[in-house]
Amino acid sequence: MRTYGRVYDEYDNPSWVEVVTDNNGANDFVFLTTLIQCLLLNLGESPFYANYGIPGQQSVIQQIFPDYYVVQTQTQFAPFFAALIINKLALRDAEGVPYPAYKVNVTTNQGVGVEATVPI
């Protein structure tokens, strides 16, 4: 199994990285990368997986956190991990305006804890 995730270097230049099943046959990091990509995906943006993603652009415009869609995404990905918790963060930009961001806490099936912050 494989997926692709976008990473940024120290100069903020984006590049795509392939994430594949590890040598032991575990797909946890493939699913974690896909989860993060889905949180960054607009709802209906993918022609193949229209039910994945969240209305991030509308959330930023309306200043309403997309909690319902984040919970739906968490429910879709929870069976692939030992534990998956996504929490809303109260982050603010330089002017003090709040913006949607979430903290993703995952415990893989091998017992490894992974934490990521995903700004929407």
Image (tube, rainbow, N blue to C red):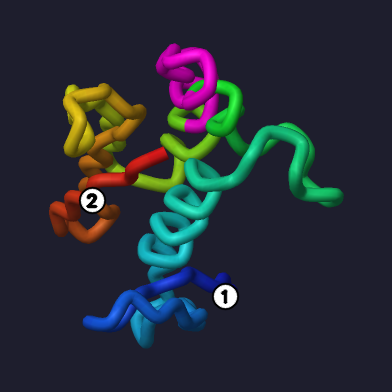
Position of residue 95 measured from the top left corner of the image (x, y, whole percent): 20, 30
The secondary structure type at the circle numbered 2 is strand
- Which numbered disc, 2 or 1, marks the residue that appears first in the sequence? 1
Position of residue 53 measured from the top left corner of the image (x, y, whole percent): 61, 37
Could you tell me which residue is drawn at 44 percent across and 46 percent down? 80
* Residue at far bottom of view: 23
Residue 116: mark in rendering = 2
The residue segment tinted magenta is 60-73
Q: Residues within 10 Å of mark 2 (few under 14, many from 20)?
A: few
Query: What's under tag 2, amino acid-wise?
Result: Ala
Q: Residues within 10 Å of mark 1 (few under 14, many from 20)?
A: some
* Residue 11 or residue 83, whichever sits in front: 11
The secondary structure type at the circle numbered 1 is strand
Q: Quadrant of residue 93?
A: top left
Q: Nearer the viewer, mark 2 or mark 1?
A: 2
The residue carrying mark 1 is 2
Could you tell me which residue is drawn at 77 percent across and 49 percent down? 46
User: Quadrant of the image for the N terminus?
Assistant: bottom right
Is 53 one of the magenta-colored residues?
A: no
State whether the magenta stretch is mostly helix, strand or loop.
helix
Q: Is residue 45 above or below residue 78?
A: below
User: Quadrant of the image for the C terminus?
Assistant: top left
Could you tell me which residue is drawn at 35 percent across and 80 percent down? 24
Could you tell me which residue is drawn at 48 percent across and 19 percent down? 66
Position of residue 105 measured from the top left corner of the image (x, y, whole percent): 21, 41
* Residue at far right of view: 47
* Residue at far front of view: 95
Asked if disc 2 and disc 1 are in contact, CB closer than 8 Å, the reply is no
Q: Is residue 115 above or below residue 69?
A: below
